Image: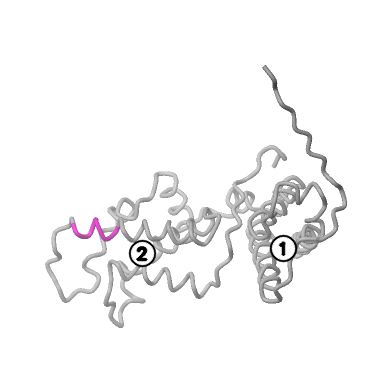
Amino acid sequence: MDDQELPDIIIPNPLPMKAREDLMEKIVSVVVPHPNINANYDARMIEFKEYVKYLEKKAFERAHSRDEYYAMLARLMYRMQKLLEMRPRRADSNDPYGDIPLSHELADFMGLTQEELEEFDEEQNPQGPSAADEAIAKSTITPKLRRTVVDKLGSMLFPPPDPFAYLEGRMDSITRKLEKIEAKAYKECDDRDEYYNMVSLRAYRLQKEYKKSGKSYLDRIVRYPVLVIRTEVVE
């Protein structure tokens, strides 16, 4: 991949997998509030949960913060609730899966775009390791992408308190720590997805350490004083 052709870099505030699974269960419960013991074997339920899993993953990848991630899933649940209200009542009230739309209706019910539907179908029916594996290969982690990842982690998890913090060198220490985290993730990962997961999770842990200790990630020393020159136009 050319350095100019960067993929969309999304490094959300990481959530434990258990929390994400709980959210997926809440989404499923909008349509199936009372599943029975056959939930793991019912074809409708299995397919429906695959759609939910896919859309949760897309929200996690696209969101820049927890709030944005939650908002995306809340919109999905609201859409499903409204569509259920508009649908005729199911004939068999004893069927806990009767409100799940038919297979050919599910994508529209869940709000998938055509591009997302094609991607979902590809994930469910993989044709081989060709394009998909090459797209996330470690070779696609270019130097420019790596710099962008460090910059994005810094701005999201350790925001500068003022416009001059970076220019004056007060962010140097935390930037070096993020660079070490990124370098280790790059060395240990097998592909780009694993790289994103490693670097974001470790950076988030670093943020938690600072919050727990109460220490500031901002350096006190001003290494490169910035001179601000103001000009006034007199008519």
| Measured Cα–Cα span from mark 1 to mark 2 | 31 Å
Work out whether 1 lies above or below 175. Answer: above
Amino acid carrying mark 1 in the image = Cys
**Residue lying farthest to the left in this orientation:** 91
Q: Which quadrant would residue 72 be assigned to in this image?
A: bottom left
Outermost residue to the right: 223
Specify few, some or many for label 1: CA neighbours under 10 Å numbering under 14, 14-19, or 20 or more: some
SS assignment at label 1: loop
Give the residue drawn at x 82%, y 40%: 227
Which quadrant is home to the C terminus?
A: top right
The residue drawn where x is 48% and y is 69% is 20
Query: Is the residue 47 above or below the residue 192 in the image?
Result: below
Mark sitting earlier along the chain (1/2)? 2
Compared to residue 16, the image places residue 135 above or below, namely above
Q: Determine which residue is flagged by label 1.
A: 189
Asked if disc 1 and disc 2 are in contact, CB closer than 8 Å, the reply is: no
The range drawn in magenta is 80-85
**Residue 166 sits above or below residue 177 on the image:** above
| Amino acid type, label 2 | Glu
What secondary structure is the stretch in magenta mostly built from?
Answer: helix
Left or right, 3 with respect to 193, comes to right
Residue 35 spot, x, y in % from top left: 29, 77
Could you classify mark 2 by the number of other residues whose Cα lies within 10 Å: few (under 14), some (14-19), or many (20 or more)?
Answer: some
Residue 211 in the image, given as x and y percentages of width and height = 66, 71
Q: Which mark is residue 47?
A: 2
Q: Is 171 left or right of 78, judged from the image as shown?
A: right
- Residue 234: which quarter of the image? top right
Dot label at residue 21: none
Percent position (x, y) of residue 89?
13, 63
Q: Nearer the viewer, residue 78 or 47?
A: 78
